[in-house]
Image: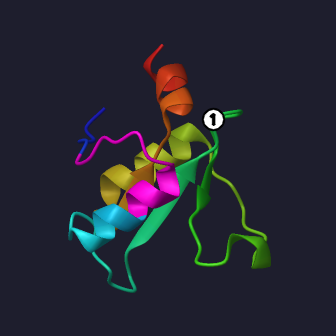
């Protein structure tokens, strides 16, 4: 696909995202954006500091992968269930 894995862990996806930022795998910068995959329908939503306070649009797998390939300031966060569906 053209994407590379930088960290694989058994942690909850948001915990893994936090650890990746603390280890400088993912930058803390304000222009960096992270998106998490919904394993039910494989749509992507922005990861916000307060998930409950914002209603955000979701993106299809194709839209998100196209965006991530063009923009290095995007990190994709995925859990094992979603990864298994994508890998099939």
Q: Image point 58% across, 78% down: which residue?
A: 49
Question: According to the image, label 1 marks what residue?
Answer: 39
What is the span of residues highlighted in magenta in the rendered image? 6-17
* Mark 1 closeness class: few <14, some 14–19, many ≥20 residues within 10 Å: some
88 above or below 42?
above
Residue 16 sits above or below residue 81 on the image:
below
Q: Position of residue 41 (x, y in %)?
A: 70, 34
- Residue under the point 38% across and 53% down: 68
Q: Is residue 62 above or below residue 51?
A: above
Indicate the position of residue 47 as horizontal and vertical percent values. Answer: 56, 66
- Tell me, yes or no, whether the highlighted magenta stretch contains residue 10: yes
Q: Nearer the viewer, residue 85 or 13?
A: 13
- Residue at 59 percent of width and 73 percent of height: 48
Specify whether residue 45 is painted magenta: no
Q: Hey, which residue is sitting farthest bottom in the picture?
A: 30
Q: Secondary structure at mark 1?
A: loop
């Amino acid at each position: 696909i053209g994407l590379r894995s930088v960290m694989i862990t058994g942690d909850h996806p948001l915990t893994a995202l936090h650890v990746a930022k603390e280890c400088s795998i993912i930058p803390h910068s304000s222009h960096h954006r992270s998106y998490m995959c919904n394993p039910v329908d494989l749509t992507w939503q922005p990861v916000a500091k307060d998930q409950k306070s914002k209603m955000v649009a979701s993106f299809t797998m194709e839209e998100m992968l196209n965006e991530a390939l063009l923009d290095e300031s995007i990190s994709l966060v995925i859990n094992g269930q979603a990864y298994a569906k994508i890998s099939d």
